[in-house]
Image: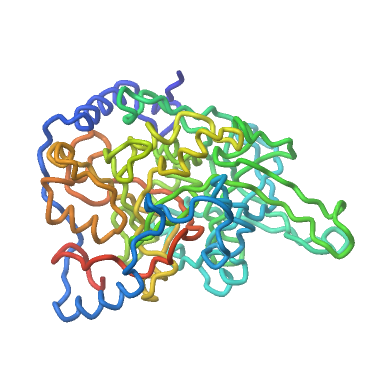
Amino acid sequence: MVLLTSRRLGGFLSAAALAALSAALLLLLTGAPASAAQGHHKRGHHTTKHRRIHHQARRAGNAKPPGAANGLGQLSGILPRNHLTEESALNVDLTHETVRLPLYPGTAPVPNEPGKTEKVWFVLLDASDQGLAHDLGVNYAPKLANIAVSDPEAVQTVTLDSPSPEANKFGPANVHFQGAPDFSPTRIAEPGPNGFPLKGFQPGSVASNGYSPFIKIAGSDVIYNAPIVAAGEGPFDVAHHTNTEDRVLGVHIGTEANAPSGQFGESWVDLLFVKGFDAGQPIVYLSTDAGQPLTSVLERSTYVPALNAASYNGGDDFLGSARERLFGFINGQVGANNEQAQGFRNLILDGHASEDASAANTGLINALRNGGDLLNVFGDFPTEASPRHADAYSPLWDAQLGLWTEKAIKEGLNKRQIDENQAFNLANKRPDLLTGINPATGEPTKYGAAGVDINCAVIGYTNEAPTANLEEPAENSQFEPR
């Protein structure tokens, strides 16, 4: 077992600190007494009339519960195209838990080898400009325009080739990146006695200096979400991921030389998606990067230190924020056939999180397909009925981590959550059941931002489109203009 320390990789906990954190979390997760902290949320409130009108409109279309018996919507086959928010996706294969996306070429410095460059391959997921987002078939995420506020390294400036007609009859130009992920480390997620906390961990992909998945092209201010997911000319390792990100399950490189005249040599990648919820509806999304080491291990994503300070913890819909909030649960219920299962322990115990993800690992694929995923709850979503909430979507998620108390666990009240307002209201009204958690100590704390951010672009929904939250916010639990 390999455990990187903070000296070897900036954001890691030392062995002693990890042991202390594991011990603290272990006590909490196994039912040790935990003090209930008071819920803490954004300031402000609605007038009664404002709330009634606003949320009656937002609830429109959400009368039906999620479709499948276990609440996860369609579980097999190809997701209908009218269920996609990521319109450029070639398909979403629910049987194999993959989304197939166009793959674009670039070059980047070879990590840890000064002066050398290599071929890299990236996907396009979001854009801060509405017209360009529609043109590219990606999610519109205007909040990305704020991502470099107080954190310039969160955005990577890239350059484009200007190819001749002979060099490029029809296709993308090479993008020249300043940095790239190092895919060579072995991902480690060694379960602890109760699954989570992990006994040991190590990201399987680590950003080199200069790398961020959020890019802008020199001469333009538009921010794109363009994670690099593979490196080299192939063959690509889609079993142990020595030159691919840990969610890459298949790669096809098309060439103009092999394409018939007048046709485009299309390249694509199959990526393992993630399941979750928004506004009471089951959704699928990608997780490609995180600003913290442990987060990147759990998400099978690239650890990008530059994202840790991206604008900004707790920001959500406040001035200058690039983030939208996401709700995760440390110690929800577990069990492969449990319709209430959710959270970190569920992922480790029932989602095969310690194993390499590959198309051949059908045990892992089927476990995730049937509810063994994190099943996080998202805030705003591109299909929300209110334009303000649709446009508040961002792929950069600010995690609000919930810790169920001993009382909630004993009484079986640590049930699966599927809506952000319901989660916020529960923490606000019942701090005896749900508190926040301090990631550094494992102790309960006020509910809210936990200092965890994740790059998760939404792909689509597997039942009905999320249009409005399932209930109104509790008084003083959120800021205007919710």
In the picture, measured across the screen, residue 116 lies left or right of residue 345, that is: right
Residue drawn where x is 34% and y is 21% of the image: 15
Closer to us: 72 or 425: 72
In the picture, measured across the screen, residue 392 lies left or right of residue 472, that is: right
- Residue 389 lies, in percent from the top left, at 36, 70
Q: Specify the quadrant of the image occupied by residue 236.
A: top right
- Residue 96 lies, in percent from the top left, at 57, 45
Residue drawn where x is 18% and y is 46% of the image: 434
Which residue is the extreme one toward the front?
69
Residue drawn where x is 51% and y is 48% of the image: 273
Colour mapping used in the image: rainbow
Q: Specify the quadrant of the image occupied by residue 10.
A: top left
Number of marks in the image?
A: 0
156 vs 65: above or below: above
Image quarter in which the C terminus is found: bottom left
Which residue is the extreme one toward the top?
1
Image quarter in which the N terminus is found: top left
Q: Specify the quadrant of the image occupied by residue 17.
A: top left
64 vs 101: above or below: below
Residue drawn where x is 37% and y is 49% of the image: 70
455 vs 113: above or below: below
- Residue 419 lies, in percent from the top left, at 30, 58
- Residue 40 lies, in percent from the top left, at 16, 54
